[in-house]
Image: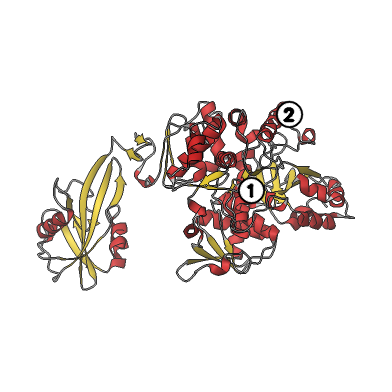
Amino acid sequence: MFLTREEERILAGEKGVGSQRAMELLLAIGKIYDAERLVPVTSAHLSGVSYKTIGDGGLDFLMQMAEDARVSVRTTLNPAGMDRERWGEMGVSPEFARKQTAIIDTYAKMGVEANCTCTPYLTGNTPRQGETIAWAESSALSYVNSVLDARTNREGGPGALAAAIVGKTPMYGLHLEENRHATVVIEAEVQDEITDYSLLGHAVGLRLGGAVPYFKGIRPDVNGLKTLAAAMAAAGSVALFHVEGITPKASAQKLESLERVQIGREEIERAKDSLTTGRDPDLIALGCPHLSRMEMKMLASRLDGRRKRPDAPEVWFCTSRTVRTWCPKETAVLERFGKVLCDTCMIVAPIEPAHKCTATNSAKACTYLPGLCSQKVICDSYSALLEMIL
Amino acid sequence: MDVNTGKLSSTSGAEGRNITGAVFGFPHGRGSTVGSYTLLQMRKNSTLPIAIINERAETIVATGAIMAGLPMVDSIDLLLLRDGDRVKVDGSEGSVELPSVQESKVVTCVLMHQGKVLALKRSDKVSTNRGMWAGVSGYIEPGERPIDTAIKEIREEVSVESPRLLKDALVQSIRVEDRVWRVHPFLFEVDTDLVTLDWEHTEYRWIYPHQASELSAVPGFLRILRSLL
């Protein structure tokens, strides 16, 4: 790889040990993918925040880096393993809380904005079209690549951190125009409803792995797009997709020679059945990805004035602290039915001691909950889930 | 993964298998971008595998391997590997060797005449795949060009001269028990359907390509046929 003199200096350790390690990691990744050089990034988003998922090994790594490394671009953070204020109500132990706080503080020491959400693009970290960025969090990077036409690879947490510190990322993969073209057409027939978009994403991700799908026949809004992105990135490794009539680069795609795949009611129902492994949930968890302002309003309007069933399971509404702050009235309504939790989610929080079966409308959550949280899961629509608590 | 024990979890399809100290092969990474930290945790817990083999490298796994100091090789056809194989992995070279698996270089020739292809039933005097159906085949001798082996075998096994080469396909690797067959496939056109068999075969049939699936074929033959037609 070609390095500028400045980059050579960082590699030699002149900017400190943390930057040196970051540069080594970037170059090692670049070497794997035959990148010619590094390119500057304008922002980063980091995964690897929950103490549950990165553990002491991750904390050690971060603390070593934070001794002298600082991020050089605007950098945001993924959800942690707990609500920073209400962790006691989540059944989180003081020891976990101590370690989790240490992780967040270590990131903050490096200059990272500890917003703790998987939807940073809704709460201020919104790249412009064509911007080169280095984002981890599979759902978020896919969303900004596809809906905003920003440019990022499917970074791992450490790779995004390294790019944030050096301010650059190796030029390969989705930073190259030729890798951003659609590779398969999905002719979808689904209901214009969040859960259907999530199940569609699940079916496509499982089947296509890391392809670049072009969707025909769907008109998802922001909430549909973010859950579609999340499901495809969890079941597969999709980092970029196009939606006819909606995403910026859709009209530029050449489709004639591409394979066509039909996904309709049958595949959606099959995906739902395959994801559902339990019954009688003891937790209903919404907000994977984090609830948007629109979703908070929608849920509040459906619950306002209704009464909670006495035997209803626990309910979590997971969102960003920013959205909660924007929605005080809606939060008050939802708090009568469950907890509006910030900074965290049902996947990366340690829910397994207290819960055995979780119901959700997110195919991404259903993909991870059995393995990460030992849960039986139920995948169903907002309507069906709300019926369980009314 | 259970990073404390090195055991695969339920979603792996191989729950309870311990990969600590083993060479771990899987097609490619998918899912969470936090996966890079998983390998780092395993290094801290001393539950790390000693190498990773993938069909396709994916950034998240690669990042984790780099951070954990784990050799990783991709572009490997996992169909050639079996559970329990002893392998030699070279992360710098990007290679995976199977020292206890024998490698045999062979040609397989499909002869075509007026739209039909020649299928031959192997006798019980041959060393492998007795009684099964295949094309004309033979071991490539050291220093011999595969095309020359092909023409020689066609003359010896079915007594046909001057076959016209229509196509040669990419070498296919097929694993059967403790042997990897490196097969060089060829498609020839011949002017006659008259065939005289030697000791290696007991029967022959001219069939339409789609009828090949009705035969008890040698492993990989159907795949090779498809690659040639």
Tell me the distance, in whole angstroms, between the alpha carbons under discs 1 and 2.
25 Å
Q: Which mark is residue A166?
A: none
Q: Is residue B106 above or below residue B213?
A: above
Q: Is residue B167 above or below residue B76?
A: below
Q: Three-letter amino acid code at disc 1?
A: Cys
Residue B1 at x, y percent in the picture: 54, 36
Mark 1 belongs to which subunit? A
Q: Nearer the viewer, residue B155 or B76?
A: B76
Q: Which mark is residue A366?
A: 1
Q: Is A71 placed left or right of B79 in the picture? A: right
Outermost residue, front side: A5
Q: Is residue A127 above or below residue A117?
A: below
Mark 2 belongs to which subunit? A
Q: Which mark is residue A93?
A: 2
Does residue A34 show up? Answer: yes
* Figure quadrant of residue A198: bottom right
Residue B26 at x, y percent in the picture: 45, 43
Does residue A273 show up? Answer: no
Instruction: Please tell me if label 1 and label 2 are on a single chain.
Output: yes
Q: Three-letter amino acid code at disc 2?
A: Ser
Q: Nearer the viewer, residue A104 or B219?
A: A104
